[in-house]
Amino acid sequence: MSERGFSGFSRRGFIQSLALSPLAAGASMAVSGTSAARDAATPKILGERFIVEAGWVLTESKGELKLIRDGQVLVSDGVIEDVRSGSFSDKLPRLKLSDQLLLPGFISGHTHCCSATPTRGIIEGPRSYARPLELVEMLSDDEMDALTALNLAELLRSGCTTHLEMSLSLRQAESYVRSAEPWGVRAYPGAMIPGIERLFAIWFRANDQVLMDAEQGTLEEIAANLAFCKKHMGKGDGRILPMMSPHACDTQTPATMRALASAAKELGTGLHIHLSQGQRETDTVKRLWGKTPTQWLESFGMLSDGPVFGAHMSGLDWDVDPPILNKHGVVYAHCPSGGGAGNGTQPYPEALAAGMAVNIGIDTHSNDYVENLKLAVLYGQARHELLGELDAARARERPTVWNAIEGATRIPAKGLGRDDLGVIKAGARADLISVEVSGMLNGTGALPPEPLNNLLYANGRMVRTVMTDGRLQVRDGQFIADEPQRVLRVGGEVAKKIWRQLEQENWFTETAR
């Protein structure tokens, strides 16, 4: 989120490709006959120990990312046991991906999972996303679960295995966990505070008395969210690690900030927040409390008690804030499609120049991680060039695909304090994805010499394999953690219900052509 009844859905247990359901129409890319025959010969149930063979593997060696040709990864009980260029002699099941690029699972430092599909394709006019998001909160639990499941399936389908999830309400956070846990998702979920039912009146308030009057309600939300975090901490064999997720500094008071700091310290899992997401937020916090949002967070000790991920940061004070953020290891979650497609750019080149830790995040409307990774590079390069013409004195660095890949893997893992995530090396968790880089549209029919560059021509449909802790969630480009056609159909019915309500409210105003 950037500045600017269908019951009966049953949640399925995790299915590790016991029987591959046909993918929902259009959701997979065709592969060549040779690749298809090779895939058909690959065992569908990999077991506790198996080997992944790939044309290219992005590994970590001596602290640096390194691509190795014809790499093999030995996985044992959800952990990478060994990585090498060349063959293992072990007679184990093998996942053969000879025309693909094997990467660590992507990590999004900012998602609002339940609310993407109801807004996608209708807010680009531009119309406000506020009313559709309010209607999501009015759904029944079953409807909300259906919507959450579809959006979560999209995230997995595009290779995003770890989510810092800021659900827009406590109900949506509960819904997220109900799908994420059985599907084997790795997540740091929490509910936005204040939640969507109270947010807009406080955020876009007519005067600051509204903020003060809302304080007690926000304190009650903090207590409820702390209880949620404790309830779900460590679920999913330790993959679910909730964290406190306040909306932003301009919707808080000193009392709620103290309560948030106390809750985050008690949990120890960190803080996830929209930080200086626009100039209005920074100006408001300076006017009320005499500090930038970054300085205000630091004054409460909120940058030093565990990981901190801040989204958007378009309103940073570039003279004051970056040194503070860098001192505390704060990760900037840069969301290229935040606010919807074509909603402007964010300060990726400036953050790189300032030495900040930058992650690629999802935000709300697009769940395609590969597309967002690509947009980060292309939008960032365009912004870099424009700044050179319009504001040449501003420090900036031209983003590369290597910056984006590191920002999708190692940087957020380090920010979370997890040296077992975001890398392919011995001892890391087997959170792995593969991307087709040799086929039509993003390849040439041959294994490319510099495969990361081919990601700039790819999208999430070219992701062929996704696994978390060695458990398959996408196989041969098919979502297999649940029944994909059912997930798509039932989630789509809920979106249609929301759109019908918007039509009745005459929300669909004319847009420019």
Image (cartoon, rainbow, N blue to C red):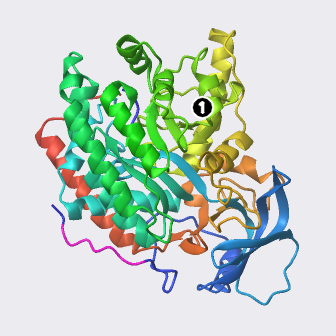
**Residue at point 49%, 27% (across, down):** 344
In the rendered image, residue 331, in percent from the top left (x then y), is placed at 58, 38
Q: Which residues are magenta?
A: 7-13
- Magenta-span inclusion, residue 440: no
In the rendered image, residue 133, in percent from the top left (x then y), is placed at 26, 42
Residue, disc 1: 379
In the rendered image, residue 171, in percent from the top left (x then y), is placed at 26, 54
In the rendered image, residue 189, in percent from the top left (x then y), is placed at 42, 53
Give the amino acid type for the residue marked by disc 1 in the picture: Tyr
- Circle 1 crowding by C-alpha within 10 Å: few under 14, some 14–19, many from 20: many
347 displayed left or right of 33: left
Question: Total of numbered circles in the picture?
Answer: 1
Where residue 429 sits, quadrant-wise, is bottom right
Q: Nearer the viewer, residue 316 or 360?
A: 316
Q: Quadrant of the C terminus?
A: top left
Q: Is residue 502 above or below residue 395?
A: below
Q: Nearer the viewer, residue 495 or 82?
A: 82
Where residue 332 sits, quadrant-wise, is top right
Q: Is residue 59 above or below residue 24?
A: above
